[in-house]
Image: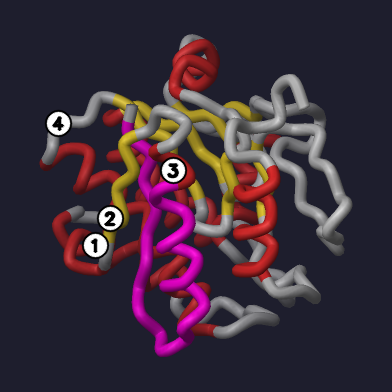
Amino acid sequence: MNVLTFFSDLGNPEPRQLLELWEPNWRAHGWTPNILDPRFIYLHPDAGSLFQATASLPTTTHWAFEVTCWQRWPAFAAYMLLYRIPAALCADYDMVNLGFNPDHARALAKDGPALHLGGGLMLLDRDAAWRLPSVLARHVNNNPSHSHNSDWRSLRMLAESGDFIAYHPALGPQGPQEPLTPTPDWKPTRTLVHLAHGATQYDRVAAFQSLTARFPNGIVGT
């Protein structure tokens, strides 16, 4: 099963370092990882309307980074259509896999075509992925903005309202764990750990390296 992530080079070396860890980490747990870039965005007809809806939204983080976050959804959809991928997991590249395999995702997929599995994680079939950019644009246009707006905030709101997306936390009530301080002796209790951008006060590359080195076979049985 395919897992997709998106990268647009904004000049920060950290994302490339994380991607170098992300790809082999996910492959080791049975996934086919795919790293998409901006070439795929405008293969989707709704990419322009999504950009118009989101480009001027307030954000408390880096504006260009948030723009790329919105743009990944038409890129994912176009990629899935182009390569005839029936369903895929869409994951942030700072998501550490500690044992979440394709069989787990297939078991969840029966619960709906568009599933929000917690921060940084969406499971989509191809038709739902194709519709999602227009759904996001409509949601942004029909709802007031806040001091910080992001794609994941809108996805969470859609999931909570049951509008197009179903909320299905794969790993417990809050989905993937998001440690504030992953100290060397910290042991995760779920099979996915999200080293979330913007909410961290630690070296995410070092944390990714530490977790995969300590749990090379995942956390099951440790």
**Bounds of the magenta segment:** 2-24
Q: Considering the numbered disc 2 on the image, is that residue within a helix, a strand or a loop?
A: helix
Q: Earlier in the sequence, mark 2 or mark 4?
A: 2
Mark 1: which amino acid? Ile
Mark 4: which amino acid? Arg
User: Is the C-beta separation of discs 1 and 2 under 8 Å?
Assistant: yes
Mark 2 residue crowding within 10 angstroms, few (<14) / some (14–19) / many (20+): many
Q: Which residue is mark 4?
A: 84
Residue 4 sits above or below residue 200 on the image: above
Q: Which residue is mark 3?
A: 90
Task: Give the percent coordinates (x, y) of residue 148.
Answer: 69, 73
- Using the rendered view, name the quadrant where residue 181 is placed: bottom right
Q: Earlier in the sequence, mark 4 or mark 1?
A: 1
Mark 3: which amino acid? Cys
Mark 4 residue crowding within 10 angstroms, few (<14) / some (14–19) / many (20+): few
Front one among 185 and 155: 185
Q: Earlier in the sequence, mark 1 or mark 2?
A: 1
Mark 2: which amino acid? Ala
Q: Which residue is mark 1?
A: 41
- Using the rendered view, name the quadrant where residue 165 is placed: top right
User: Is the C-beta separation of discs 4 and 3 under 8 Å?
Assistant: no
Q: Earlier in the sequence, mark 1 or mark 3?
A: 1
Residue 162 sits above or below residue 49 on the image: above
Nearer to us: label 4 or label 1? 4
Nearer to us: label 1 or label 3? 3
Q: CA distance from mark 1 to mark 3?
A: 15 Å
Q: Which residue is mark 2?
A: 75
Q: Earlier in the sequence, mark 3 or mark 2?
A: 2
